[in-house]
Image: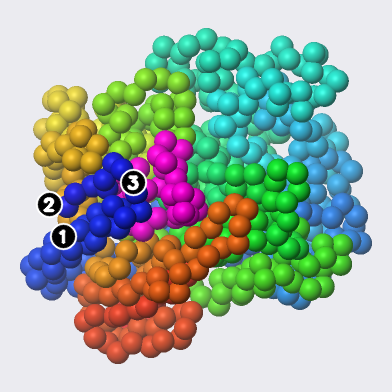
Amino acid sequence: MVRSVPQSGTAHTLREWYKEILVNRSILFGAAVLLSSVAWAGAFPDHAALEKSSWKVTLLPGQPGFVFTMYGCPGDLDKLKQMVGVMQEKVLGNGFDPGPTANAASKPLFEYLASIRWPMICYPGFGDFQIKDGNARLSDADEAAMQVLDQAGDFSAIQLGEWGYYFHNLSCAESWWHDVYGPDFDKMKQFMKPKGLAGYDTRPRDKRECYDIVKDYFTTRQRAMRGRNMSVTGHSHYEAYAGEWGARVVGLEVCENIAFTQSKIAFARGAARQWNLPWSLQASPWFSGACTTNGPLRIEGKDARGLDAGHSLSLYRRIWLHGWFAGAAMVTPENSSAIFFEDAANPDKLTTHGEAAAAFFAFTRAHERGIPYTPVAVVLDHYAGYNGYMGHPWGILENTPGDTEINDLFVWQLYPGSDHIHQRPNPDNPEDSYLRATPYGELADVLLSTATAETLRAYPMLLLAGDISFDAPFVDALCGALKQGSRVLLHPRHRDALGGDMKRLQAAGTVEVLDVWTNPATQRPAAVSNGRLARLAAECLPFDVEGDAVQYQINRTRDGWVVELINNAGVAKKPKEPAVVDPKAWATVKLVPRMPVTKAREWCTGQEFTADAVLTVVVPPGETRFVEVSVAGSPAG
């Protein structure tokens, strides 16, 4: 039986644990291949079918493809045109985040950007845009200026950034309010929330009450900005709710000091698919008192600045590439206008980071990323309010055993080692937790129980997790998915909660009641066993990934598949020191396809493979490789 990650979380024990998972998982994969290799040859959906489903990659409205933005937009029209010219010449991107301020004075800038159809994410002209009853709200004149973009068919939105963190942490932080309002603090302090209540006025009684209060906050800010808000969450997992409550884009902030990168992507992509929205990723350069900028590494007060401050270039590149490959409509490298150029005032010469950004954007234009193939939907209750950072549902409620199972599923099983908030970071490499090797691959999205049958049936496996209320619409949706061939995996607790509806589900299709399993690493009951997760990967993924520990994701293309292999090992980075590369930390990976392969090629090196049963790929430390595979019956095959 595969064991979970050890509770100690040290680098050594994590490596030993991961090796054991790989050995045991390969046995399970081998058995599955021997038993069903012929049956699986035509079992995977083709690209055209996925394009017609909720899985299709949703781009920013009006945009023909992926968007890579510059962070920082000149407020002068001539300088803006100069910046656009530099970006076009050096292949540095095709949009701005942030773009011009969302006010009437920006109309000439809007008119120019609309003429070239570059999308933009605007910031409000007020520093209190997160405060529910703050001054940040669009006037009639501001709205008229924004409509210039609408009329041209050019996408725009206004960022509501880190609103989950604001709600729970900043809404009661007096020092933050002084910084925002200065001499007007006494006039506005009435809107502060009481300490000790995580942003609520009084202690909520249950999850439904929390949901209603947080929804009221978010939708109030939506009305203030006339429905133009783009959600950006960092220290929370509220992406599904942002999609439900009307955000134009489901956005993520990652890097910074933010944990749970991969589970946040699973939440964002699931929300995008559930609500037919684009999702985006913003990589922050802040890292424990250090921030990446141009120039040499230097200490300014207590903080560090320079190209070697903050996160490593390796992590930025892996994050950009993975965000793109995972289906993001837009990737934003935060602070890029102060990082990519040797002299921001005269953007003629690129830094090493700028050159890497140009290479990344050119790479995305040269390759079809396909559609992320995530055959497992982790389905949570509509009111679950999972919040990994706060460690409590909706930031305040006590965890039930079901809530703990959800957290353990993400933190200890699917993305082990990704929590540096409640677990001790690796002192030798505090960047180690930002992207993690995945023992079962990036095989899951997260949905809420409000998902329709059409959304659910796109997933071969529906894994119910946590405490769930089986209302009639959800049971109907599950039945609809079961009738279309999806399989439902549930806990005995769910079977009992279903009552008479259990027989209805069983009559509609295959329902599997999971064995109760206690994770030896946590000594707690789990939502699903590690062994069943390994079998899910063996049953559902078109490749077995063997060898050294890597993070991997598989996408469906028109001609076959592309496998992303990320070697997150070998680059150690502390906030105020240069990155240290271990030249020996190469990862050797074997891809075992579960269908006939006609040809295969690695995108970064151009390496071509013969149509053997096993494809061996070597990934340098801190780098990513993509193996494109054509299969029999495809146009290229």
Identify the mark nearer the N-term, 3 or 1: 3
User: Pointers 3 and 1 in contact (CB under 8 A)?
Assistant: no
Residue receiving disc 2: 1
Amino acid type indicated by mark 2: Met
Mark in the foreground, 2 or 3: 3
* Residue 156 pos. (x, y %): 70, 49
Q: Is residue 438 left or right of residue 574?
A: left
Residue 475 lies in quadrant: top left
Q: Secondary structure at mark 3?
A: loop
Provide residue 580's location: percent of width, then percent of height.
53, 65
The residue indicated by pointer 3 is 9
User: Looking at the image, which residue is at 65% across and 56% down?
Assistant: 309
Residue 427 versus residue 132 in the image, above or below: below
> Looking at the rendered structure, which numbered label has been put on residue 24?
1
User: Given contact means CB atoms under 8 Å apart, are the residues at marks 2 and 1 in contact?
Assistant: yes
Query: Nearest the camera: 423 or 321?
Result: 423
| Mark 2 closeness class: few <14, some 14–19, many ≥20 residues within 10 Å | few
Cα separation, mark 2 vs mark 1, equals 7 Å
Residue 60 can be seen in this image: no
Residue 612 placement, left or right of 105: left
Q: Earlier in the sequence, mark 2 or mark 3?
A: 2
Where in the figure is residue 325, as x and y percent of width and height? 47, 63
Residue depicted at x 35% and y 53% = 11
Query: Which segment did they paint magenta?
Result: 411-439
Q: CA distance from mark 3 to mark 1?
A: 20 Å
Residue at x 53%, y 15% (from the top left corner): 196
Query: Residue 468 magenta-drawn?
Result: no
The amino acid type, in three-letter code, at marker 1 is Asn
